[in-house]
Every structure is written in structure tokens, then in C-alpha cells.
Image (tube, helix red, strand yellow):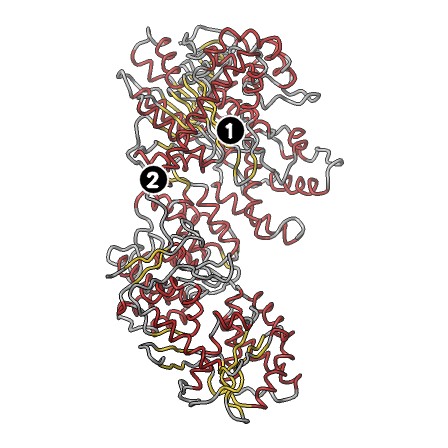
Amino acid sequence: MFEPSAAPRLFGTPIGADFGATLLEGLEARMAEAPPEAWGRVTLFVNTTRMKRHLLDQFAAGPARLMPRVHLVTDLAGGLHLTGLKPAVSSLQLRLQLRQAVARLIDLQPDIAPKSAAFDLANSLAALLDEMDDEGVDPAALADLDVGDHSAHWARSLSVISVLSGQDSDVFRTQAAFNRDALSALLSLWDAAPPQNPIIVAGSTGSRGTTRLLMEAVARLPQGAVVLPGVDTDTPQEVWRNLTASCNNPDRVPEEDHPQFRFAALAKRLGVAPDDIAPWTDTKPDTHSRNRLVSLSLRPAPVTDQWLSDGPKLAEDLSAATDGLSLITARTPRHEAAAIAFAIREAVEANKTTALITPDRTLARQVTAALSRWGIVPDDSAGVPLHQSPPGRFLIETAALFGRPLELASALSLLKHPLTASSASMRGPHLLNLGRFETWARRKGVPRVDAAVLQDWLVSWKATEEAKDWVGWLGSVLENLPNTGGEPLEARLERHIDLAEAITAGLDSSGSGQLWAEKPGEAAGAAVDELRMAAPFGGAVDNVQYLGIIRSVLSSGEVREAPIAHPLVSIWGTIEARTRTVDLSILAGLNEGTWPAALPHDPWMNRAMRRDAGMLLPERRVGLAAHDYQQAMGAREVILSRSAQSADTETVPSRWLNRLTNLLSGLGEAGDTCLKEMRARGDRLVAISSALAVHSDNPISALPAPRPAPAPPAEARPKALFVTAVSTLIRDPYAVYAKNVLKLRRLGPRAPQPDAAMRGTVLHAVMEQCLKDGFDFTDPPERTAEAFMEVAAKVVATHVPWPATRRLWLGRLASSAPGLVRVEAALQASGMPIIVEEIGTVQLRGVDFRVSAKPDRIDRLEAGGCAVLDYKTSTKPPSEKEVEAFDKQLLLEAAIAEAGGFKQLGAQRAARVGYISIGNPANSRDEPLEIEGVWRPDAMLQHLAALIRTYEDPSKGYSARRAPQFLIYASDYDHLSRFGEWDVTAAPETILVGQ
């Protein structure tokens, strides 16, 4: 295939070329005169599985020929069947073993990190050991590093690394060490008998140590060659010399962030000049003028003054270089995704192949969602992270159940999961019972779910046998959630899988539902099997540690299903931009921290230590990302996209985008014009996509809804109300209509919070318990207050599941307990509580309507009559004017008592009506019963009867927000009345309903 040569063979493909197609083209040209069987003697080494798959697709496209042998540079032993090598431990086993070592280190030195961070530290340590083996760093050399100028942390971490990496046994033998040994064995074979058949390393940049050694060896073989992707032929010799001079130079910082640095470093090691890298084919790039522009913009920082000298030389080709470029600057990632989706839609109409290239997986999912508007399903090469697939999420949710109370929100999330009770005959009945339980639990404000709560739900209605069986199944599942401490990882894993399978099986105790079905389930099962194999090396774990391990294991996998994708639309990672080309490339997420990604933090070795040890520098990642960017810029049409904001913070444009725009801005009027045209093309995409979004999210509708005053027929109107609803009838009649006519009730939150309303309910429950138990408040105050707090603690423990909230509320109650005890002692001295949270009813005169009340307490007084009392916890009692106009609750309760509405009390004339403020005695006050000779309880009852009579008129509507107390008032039915399309200044419009 190759002419004999004493020099190493280095070839390159141009920027923007389809690497697979170009590689095949060069092979065909060199094999044109070779016999057919010669193809079968060719060996190719490629750097990724995707690259291998792409090459095989190229060969499979024809014509018919023998296939070359294609191997991965990361699997030399497996591909070449090398034997006699010490095997590596699995990656997961290595991390679990290191977790135990790190955990013991944390036990000895707790200031290093919390125990929960042991597995994360083990992951980073495993990556470091793997890198050391890949780069051939001798553990003994670490002891020679001078860390005197560094903090004690780095010295301590260095000692840990030295101990672990210097183990004589193979306990921590990494895959990189195994692959490097395989390379040594292969090179020994080649030294003994140099292969005469063609061997080519293709597509790698040589950024890792073992791969670089393989490339150097292959380049020197009699029929060996290295084919580099995306070699910039427009880089001048001066720049190449600058890059070469920075390689392995202790007096200079290496230019690792330049896209061509890896090629310069490889050429230097091989003893050839970078500009001597020969073209693999005669194929010329489609966008040579743009390649020159991008090449100039990416010049290393020390020589950016060359913009002034070389920039004007681009003037005549500047228009051609930027004709196919568009620049999107969207406001948010959501707007960016919409603009990209519209650009893809246009490209599909024009029958162009299109690829979205981005490292931002969230943005890729947003674009996929936006494309669904037009039924376009892209071919996403990355698939779905396993931990975000249905079985992955399910396993993480079930792992989080151990050792903690089951909150209502967590329970509903788990029980609604599509895999829960996923057996064919179980899913329907499960969802039916779950819906009933959720409605009850949210109306009751249940914060947590346990067997007692499930039984309370059963007795609250005439439960069916099916519902009882469902509760029995769920109760048995909850019994398997003890608050265990540490236990061996393999035991915890088996308990976890048993629990997960029991939940997915549902009432059908056999099987595991759909947990392990289809590709996501198979991938999850494979991950669990891998963890099961490595679990004996994991040691003991607690609940938090196990959750971290299972989440880490699942997040390292991915699921690639095979949807019916559009043949013209793809989503690629940045590395695929090196090997494939399309008509339109969309480079998205071009912000600092995204592309390029933020440099990773290494908790074990800082940058100076890495350089001294001969390990990879963080800037290497930037250089590789820059090379991916430069390759992608070689497409015929390119859209550069970024968002100006992310998560409500301003973003910084990618350094490469900044360089390109700054270069164009400095090229005079021609550069400014080209830049404006690029932005104009991007702005058009943003404008059209925004218009589409506005039209879809806010479709053109009729005139805004009027302020409603629905008027149902007389027979549909309520015939009874509680006194607490009277204020609502006056202030917001529409709420009474929605609740009592339409029978709509607001559900409580999925995750109840300890708010003021709950505190008020709990404090009322405390007083109710004391009054019903006949608590004696007349004992000495100090002893009484102590006994009162004991009762309060029991009630609060029953109603409040949050320990911190219990302590806080009990502390606040304890501070006000002495004053409350004195008030209650005075009340007990003057009377006896007869009615405590009991319902009384009275029929209104002259109207078919009953009014009911459930007062906090009514005392029968020794002096005669009764006292109607109401507890206030956080709100101030209403003023006399508010009581006269709106808040008539307490006086109406007095009227019901006087009318004999409470059977145990009988007809008793009210002698006192008052508010007792718990926590702020200054707010306590009594309500006057008579003003200017008018007995107010009777007057309130007459006013209510008159109000009800007005609503007996079928033409009288229930106006929305008739007289809210505050502008910030929020009704449970604002969305139903379409408040916002109207305001309180609009006149109510009577709407006849049901007539």
C-alpha cells in the first residue's frame, strides 16, 4: 500500500471532510491495483465505537469486498486476542474498593470530607489512577514531587495516591494498565517480526498516552500509517513552530488549548515537521475560505497580533467565508431551542442533511421536544441517560425509600410511576384506588403515608374488597422499609431489588411487572447485574451511601432505543463532528462553561502537581473541544447558537465565538457587514420561532372573559351554609357558587408544609383535647403550664411529622402558656365548657335555609347564660366594623345558641362573645352584644335571612370578587372565573346557567 520510507508516515484529512468517507477514498486509491484478498489483510485501529460503526457502514455501502479488520485502540487485547496478560478489575469493582479505602481514610481524618462523599471521591480517584496507568506515570515518581509550596491538603492527597497506586497486588489494576500491557505485548511481537501488512491508526488525535504510543509505533512500521482528522493546512509555519516549542518545555506553558496542538506534539515525538503531514487524499475542503477565517481566529494567544497582518488578506474571500454562517443569540435556552428547531424544520423542507452538535444534553432534549411540533424525530446518537429512563428513575426512587418516612409527595410520585403495578391486569385497579386515596389524602392534608393512614382511608368510606386488597399490598410493601443502619452492600442491593420488584408486580405477587422489559429495562438489569457482581467489594453502606452508589451506577449508562427517526436530522456529541459531515451543522450551547466545558476540579492533584508528574493538564479538554468546533465549522452551512441567559444569570459567549466576532469586527467595513448579515440570519430564526411560540402558547381568542356573576336556577342554589361561609358569600359570592353549586373543592398540596394554617389547626386541636378531657386549669400556674405542655406535646407529635417544626411550635407555645393558663383558669372559674367543636344548626325565619356552626367552645356560665368563644392563633381578631359588615361568624354562633341549635346546651342567652388570642393576649377582646338597643345576634340572623332572600331570585348572580378584603386576596376559583382577563373595576355580568 505504501512506498518504503525511513520517515514515519503521518497523513491528515482536511477540515470539514467526512472522515470515514475520506479514509475509504484514500484506501481505495491505494488499493486500486491490489488483488481483492489484499483488503482482508488491512488492519484499522479507530478511537471510538461510533467511529468503528461509521466506518463499517461506509464499507457496507459497497462495492462488495473483503472487510478490513477494525479494532479499537482502547481494547487492544480483546481485538487482537493477546493472551497471558493480568486481567484488570472491573471499573465498578475498582470504584467500590476505593470507596472502602476512602471511607477508612475519612474515619481516620474526618476533616477530609463527609462520609457521604466517599463514593464520589472514589470515582475521581479511580479516574486518576486510570490516567496514571494510561500515561505511564511511575507511582514511585510521585514521591519525588516537591509539594513544599502547596497546602497540607495536597501533600496528604499525594501520600494517599502513592500508597494506592504503588500496591504490589492487582487489587487496583485499572483497564488502562491492562490496555498498556497489551500494547507492550503487541510492540514486542512487532519488534520480533515486523508486520508487512498495512496497519493504520485512524481518527485519533493522540491525546492519551497509550494511544499516542500505538500511533508512534504504527507510523514507523514498514506498512504502517497514521491518519489524523481535521489537520489545519492553513496554519502557518510560525504557528506550528510556536506550538511545537511549547511541547514538553518546562520553561513554557504548553498551548494545549489550541485545536492543532496534539498534532504538533505527535509530530515532534516522531521527529517530523507538522507542516510535513501529507494529505491522505486529494480532496479539497468545501469551505476553504471559511477554514482560513476560523484558523486565523483560533491562533494562539501569543501570536494574535497576526490578525493585523493576516486579516486583511481574507478581505476578498470574506463574503464567501461567511455566506453560510448564521449567528443566533437567543434570550434563554428555551428560545434557543425553538430557533434551532425552526432552522431544522427549514432544512428538512430543503432536503438538507442536518446535525445539531452540542455537549449540552438538556438543550438537545429541548430541541427534540420543540421538533415534535412538526412530527420530526431526530436520530440522537447519545440516547437517554439510564438514570433518566423509566426503570432508572424507578430504581432511584425506590432506593430513596429506605430509612426515611414516606412523604405524601414521594409516595404519590412512586405509586404513579408507569412501572408501579405494571402487570397487565394490575395497572387499572391500582390507578383507580390510588386516585381515590390521593383525593382523600390531599383534602385531609396528610403529610406522610404509613399503614395507619391507609387504614384511616379505608374506614372513611365504604371500601370495596379490591380497595382492601390494595391497602393490604401497599401496607406489606411499607413494612419492608425499616430504618436500618449500615449493612453489606450485597444485602442492601438484594433488599432493594426485592422491594422494586414487589412494587412493580402489584397485587400479583409473582414476577416483576415491566421493570426489566424492553431496552430500558434490559439496560437497567445489566447495570444491576454488574453491581451485584461487584457488591462483595463494596463493604457496608448506610441509606445515603447506597443511594449515591445506585445513582452513580445508573447515571454512567445510557439507553439507545431505535425510534423511527427522520433520515435527514441527527443530534451528535462534539466528538462526532470530527468524523462525519452534513449539509447544515448547528453548533449550539456556545457559552463558556458549556462549550468549552468548565475545567474539572481534581480533589487529588492540582495543576502544578500534574505537570510535574507528567500527567494530562486540564487545558487538554479545551484543545480537544476546540478541534471539534473547528471541524464542525467546515460544513457547507453552519449555525452558531447561544443563549444570553441561563437560569436567570447572564452567560459569557464561548471564547471561540468571541474570537470570531472580534476578528470580523476588526476587518473594517467588510467584516462588519458580514457579521451583521450573520446576526440578521440568526435573528430571523429567533423572530419566526418566537412568533410561532406566541401563537401556540397564546392562540388568538375571543374578547377577554367578562367578570362573571353566574345565576343558577333556584332549586340548584344552596339551602344551607356554615357561618364561616357567610363572609365568603358577602365578599366573594362566586366562591360559594363554585363550592356549593358546582361541588368543586380545592385539593391540598402534594407536599403539605408547616404553614400558619396548619399551626392554627394544631393549636385548636391542643385546646380541643384539653377541654374535652376536662383539663384542670385551676391548679397552681407553674404546674398547670407544665401539664398543659405535656398534653400539647402529644397532640403536636400526632399532627406534625417534622421534628424541627415540632420543637419550634412547642417553644412558641411554651412562651405563651403561662398567660393562656391564667385566661383558661378564669374561664373555668366562671363557667363550664359544654360545646367543643360540635355542630349546631338553626332554620332561618321566612326563608327555606339552614345555617350551621362549629364553634371552638361555648361555656355555660354559673351566673346564667353562655359565653361563645373563638381562639385566634396567628391572625388578629376582626374589628367591630369588619364584624358589622362581613365577619359575622361569632355573633351568628351566639344567635344559634340562643335559638337552641346546640342540643347539649339548650337555648341559652349569650352573656359573652369574645376572641382569645393564643400567643398575644393583647389581641384578645370581647364583641359587644348590644349597640343602641339592638341585640346584635338577632340582628345578624335577620341580616343573613335578608341576604339569602336576595339570592332566591333566579336572576341574582353570584358575582366574582364582590368585595375582597385585600388586593392580594387569592380565591381558590380565580382560574375558573378567569380572573386576570377582567379586574375588580369591571361590572359583573349575570350569566344564566342551567336555565
Mark 2–mark 1 Cα distance, whole angstroms, equals 35 Å
Name the residue beneath numbered marker 1: 590
Residue 125: name its quadrant.
top right
Residue 345 picture location, percent across and down: 34, 28
**Res. 535 in view:** yes
Q: Quadrant of the N terminus?
A: top left
Relative to 317, residue 49 above or below: below
Q: Residues within 10 Å of mark 2 (few under 14, many from 20)?
A: few
Residue 786 picture location, percent across and down: 63, 81
Q: Residue at x 40, y 34 (%)?
A: 367
Residue 708: name its quadrant.
bottom left
Seen from the viewer's position, the closer of residues 790 and 850 is 850
| Element class at badge 2 | loop
Q: Hey, which residue is sitting farthest front in the picture?
A: 932
Residue 462 picture location, percent across and down: 29, 73
Relative to 512, residue 518 above or below: above
Disc 2 residue type (three-letter): Ile
Seen from the viewer's position, the closer of residues 326 and 530 is 326
Q: How many marks?
A: 2
Relative to 766, residue 354 above or below: above
Name the disc covering residue 700, or none: 2
Residue 267 picture location, percent across and down: 56, 14
Disc 1 residue type (three-letter): Leu
